[in-house]
Amino acid sequence: MLRVAVPNKGALSEAAAAILAEAGYRRRTDAKDLTVLDSSNDVEFFFLRPKDIAIYVGSGELDLGITGRDLAWESQAPVVERLALGFGASTFRYAGPAETPMTVDDLAGKRIATSFGNIVAADLAKRGISAEIIRLDGAVEISIALGVADAVADVVGSGRTLRQHGLAAFGEVMCESEAILIHGADKEPSAAANGLIARVQGVVVAQQYVMMDYDCRKDLLDDAVAITPGLESPTIAPMADENWVAVRAMVPRSGHQAVMDELSALGAKAILVTDIRSCRF
Ligand SMILES: Nc1ncnc2c1ncn2[C@@H]1O[C@H](COP(=O)(O)OP(=O)(O)OP(=O)(O)O)[C@@H](O)[C@H]1O
Ligand SMILES: O=P(O)(O)OC[C@H]1O[C@H](OP(=O)(O)OP(=O)(O)O)[C@H](O)[C@@H]1O
Ligand SMILES: [Mg+2]
């Protein structure tokens, strides 16, 4: 039986559960459940703290896991990132009081509060900067106001939490994070694990594209196909009116409205967009 770790709460848990449900796996019915047995797919899901997931997967006890790239790095567990899942995007950065702008060099000799002590230690070592790391579990942005730190290093999503606390990010981004699917570095994924990876990948790719259908005069077809080249190439189907064809192509979700504008300006008619729920290539 395949054993898979899923975040039990926090920023990644809902989207991770939604992707697995779309991929055909059983959802947990109670948010307090720590395991779900999906016997029809021969998979058992373990709902764990996102921080701990790379440790379980790296130990080899669990086959696959969904976690954040920043958390996987921080754990230092021997795991491999197999698939980026396209949600939970954030950056991991230094921040300090907005009214006294800082640079990374200013961190020398200072106290830096973070719940990602290993990433920060590695970054400081790389730069040859010596500073004190204050390891906190969360709500790190308040630590400067409370007097235990001079700077912080934390996850920045929208940037709202930093602004709320009068802080500004500075320095290079230490980690561009998003949710990822990991397996242990010590063993290649089994056929069953690859099956789950393929299903999840099908959902992730589907979420990044839309299906576009439109009608096009034959003399405009070359220009239309240049606007919607599809992944391989678009499907062209005959219409009752022999001067027209129906075109169907996958289009990246981001920017699909601009593609519709271009097609419309070219003279395409009946341009329809539909969501794709899952796909396999
Ligand atoms: N505001 C956010 N926007 C985008 N991603 C985020 C945000 N907050 C956290 N994440 C990402 O979600 C993952 C898990 O973080 P989360 O805060 O849910 O867990 P945690 O801090 O261990 O748990 P908790 O906050 O419940 O103590 C990390 O990879 C992090 O980068
Ligand atoms: O840039 P924003 O969109 O404001 O999001 C960033 C905040 O979200 C996370 O906090 P979380 O809610 O997980 O609380 P925690 O600090 O206790 O982990 C993260 O640690 C930041 O504090
Ligand atoms: Mg958190």
Image (spheres, rainbow, N blue to C red):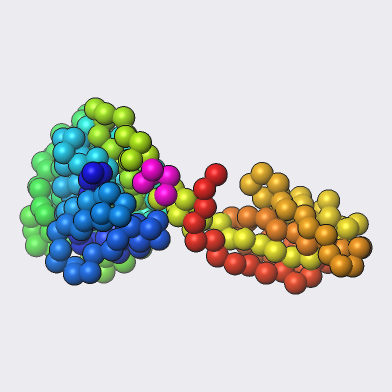
Horizontal and vertical percent for residue 87? 38, 56
| Residue 196 is inside the magenta segment | yes
Judged left or right of residue 168, residue 149 is left
Identify the residue at image location x=63%, y=47%: 231
The answer to whether one can see residue 122 in this image is no
**Is 22 located above or below residue 133 in the figure?**
below
Judged left or right of residue 204, residue 259 is right
Q: Quadrant of residue 31?
A: bottom left
Seen from this angle, which residue lies furthest bottom? 270
Identify the residue at image location x=16%, y=47%: 52
- Given residues 138 and 20, the one toward you in this image is 20
The answer to whether one can see residue 117 in this image is yes
| Residue 126 is inside the magenta segment | no
Identify the residue at image location x=84%, y=55%: 221
The residue stretch that appears in magenta: 195-199
- Given residues 20 and 122, the one toward you in this image is 20
- Given residues 226 and 239, the one toward you in this image is 239
**Is 275 located above or below residue 78 in the figure?**
below
Horizontal and vertical percent for residue 277? 50, 61
Q: Quadrant of residue 189?
A: top left
- Quadrant of the image for the C terminus? top right
**Is 151 located above or below residue 107 in the figure?**
below
Horizontal and vertical percent for residue 50? 20, 52
